[in-house]
Image (spheres, rainbow, N blue to C red):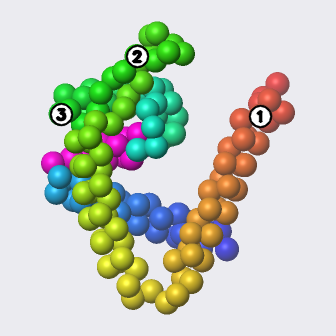
Amino acid sequence: MSDEMALLVADVFEAAGALRRSGEAIAATMGQTQARWQLLSVLSDGPRTVAQAARRLGVARQGVQRVANDLVGENLATFQPNPDHRNSPLLELTPEGRHVLREITTRATESNRALAADFPPGEIAAARDLLRRLTHRVRQQQERSSSPSHEAP
């Protein structure tokens, strides 16, 4: 079973790489990168600080700051005063940013439909279920290994 698990991990990484390249190609149709697309998407449900967006994406704040600055430079997002924290402005999509996100999302939806077209009903849902359970177990394992009871004396 552990050999199968190792092969699954390798397959997941391979699939992630292929999907990331596909996402880059989709974002590029609108002159964007996948990192910019992800940040546009995070901002689609409302303004956030760069730190909040970074936590949501699970990446370093510094990287998100660079992407945020790029989006602001292209008038796809804007920094607004944050009433809760003077030194952490809120990053918000502009109308042009919403338009770009809609276009990229439409193209991604078309691509996803084409990718899924030949899979039997339920197979995608079953794969998602397995990946969610696997992710949950990995997180549990990480929490256990980082808890004080597992540290060396």
* Callout in the foreground (1, 2): 2
Q: To which quarter of the image does residue 1 belong?
A: bottom right
Neighbour class for label 3 at 10 Å: few (<14), some, many (≥20)?
few
Q: To which quarter of the image does residue 3 belong?
A: bottom right
The mark that comes first in sequence, 1 or 3, is 3
Identified by mark 2, the residue type is Pro
Neighbour class for label 1 at 10 Å: few (<14), some, many (≥20)?
few
The boundaries of the magenta stretch are 31-43
Name the magenta segment's main secondary structure.
helix
* Residue named by callout 1: 147
Q: Is residue 90 visible?
A: yes
The residue that appears at 28% across and 36% down in the rendered structure is: 94
Q: Residue at the front extreme?
A: 95
Q: Is residue 3 visible?
A: no
Q: Is residue 49 above or below residue 32?
A: above
* Secondary structure at numbered mark 1: loop
